[in-house]
Amino acid sequence: MKAQTQSLREVPIMVRKWGLLAVSIVLASSLAACGGKNDNGGEGAASKPAETTSGSKGETVTLKFLNISEYLDSAEFKEFLDRFEAKYPNIKVDPVSVPHEQYINKRNIMLASGEQVDLIWGNGVEQFDAINKGFLMPLDDVAQEVGIDMSKDFGDFKPDKDGKHYRFPIQQNNWMLYYNKKVFDDAGVPYPDPKVPMTWDEMAEVAQKITNTSGKDKVYGMFYNNWGMYFYGYGSQLNEGKFYTDDGMANIDAPEFKRSLEWMNDVMNVRKAAMPIAEYIQNNTDFLSYWNGGYGMVVGAQWYAQLAATKKDQYPRDWKAGIAPMPVPTEMAGKHMNWSNIDSLAVPKNSKHAKEALILAREYVADYTLGAGALPMYTKVSKDQYFADLAEALKDDDITLEQVTYLFGGDPDVINVEEKPVLGAPQEYESTFLDIVSQYYTGAMTVDDVLKSVKTKVDAAIVEQSKQ
């Protein structure tokens, strides 16, 4: 089954502040110089003529754009904003920059109080949380005014609620397996196949074979992040991302998710092929730690490529990275699968300039996003140059254009499944799960008790939210 999902990244957001710098210089320059012409001779959004921005008099409007500081404070965004305001002199942008850890609270306060906000960023969990709270307006009609068809211009992008789109898609993550070729060579283990994914069971066996914790420099066969998908993502592949029951309650106690959590316990606590979670937390381990060289494999999205390609001065290494398809359950052996996560922009109900906000959203997706090393979902932007520049940036690791194209968004047959729960009480669902799951891996609770506790708390949050 080929599924198009609507979920969050949601990968912790800070990871996406890392643009592919080598790619961004080329792409940002080319977009600015050529006005957004794509390889097929068509025009991307960045080349559209400026619309009248505010009524018949064309008076200047100011947009309040709420986003995380990891994006708004970047040089790439400031350069984009200069290009945007030069192109649309009647639209000024007032960026509201908020550190990610404070973002949701700030957003909720601003929108619940009725303060004017014209455009907000969010991952799937955050945007569905805003939809459920009644903060956002549907975009379909106003998008038509700026030349966007929400049902056609982002691929097979389904409506969010009641047949309407509330999110303007930025990008969908592409997950894959990154591996340390030196660790594999030292252990005498063959590299993963570049096209045929390992099963999770095979990955566990390989991780155990390449683990070496006897020397002064520990090498764990597998690295993970303390994010939900690393614990329940295997289960999402098994049940096609069914995080909710048919009546809208939490489905986290489904056997597929239990099997997923047990798999991680086997790797971590039985095979000793991954860092114990207590040690992980105590060391303040983060996603960057993989590039220190003490790990054999990690499942990660395309943002890991930035570190492999352009951060060698910051994370020097004497080893080459490889990429392969992400692992799959035995039942899906041979299939190319992906955890789908969609970042997006949205227009709050209290916006005074919805049309201008979507002009900004369109240009952000077609210009800034591509320039920061991410492949936008906007189908009027060509993919070919993106793949070529990315392959060039990764050539020192002997990663080919064919591999990049296949794994970074060029496989039309990839099977996308939900990366995270995004419907009922999504913020509470994810935070509750992460608060409790570590107790299973430290032996404080059984897996059944953990899943039962998470379900009870999340169900209560879903019911409470439905009353709002």
Image: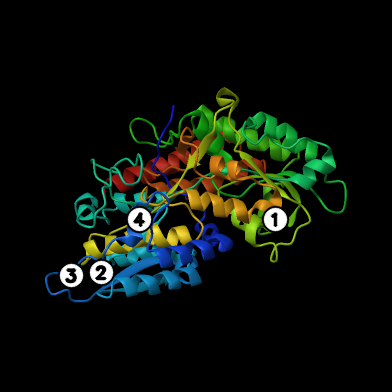
> Which SS class for mark 1?
helix
Q: Nearer the viewer, mark 1 or mark 2?
A: 1
Q: Quadrant of residue 143?
A: bottom left
Callout 1 amino acid? Trp
Q: Tag on residue 44?
A: 4
Tag 2 or tag 3, which sits nearer the N-term?
A: 3
Tag 3 or tag 1, which sits nearer the N-term?
A: 3
Q: Is residue 217 visible to the viewer in this orientation of the structure?
A: yes
Which residue carries the number 2 mark?
116
Tell me if label 1 and label 4 are in contact, CB under 8 Å. no
Quarter of the image for the N terminus: give it. Answer: top left
Q: How far apart are marks 1 and 3 (CA)?
A: 49 Å
Q: Please state which of residues 384 and 24 is positioned toward the viewer in this rendering.
A: 384
Callout 4 amino acid? Gly
Q: Where is residue 342 in the image (x, y as percent from the top left)?
A: 42, 48
Q: How far apart are marks 4 and 2 (CA)?
A: 30 Å
Which residue carries the number 1 mark?
291
Q: Where is residue 448 in the image (x, y as percent from the top left)?
A: 56, 33
Q: Which of marks 3 and 4 is in front?
A: 4
Which residue in the rendered view is the most extreme toward the front? 41
Which residue carries the number 3 mark?
54
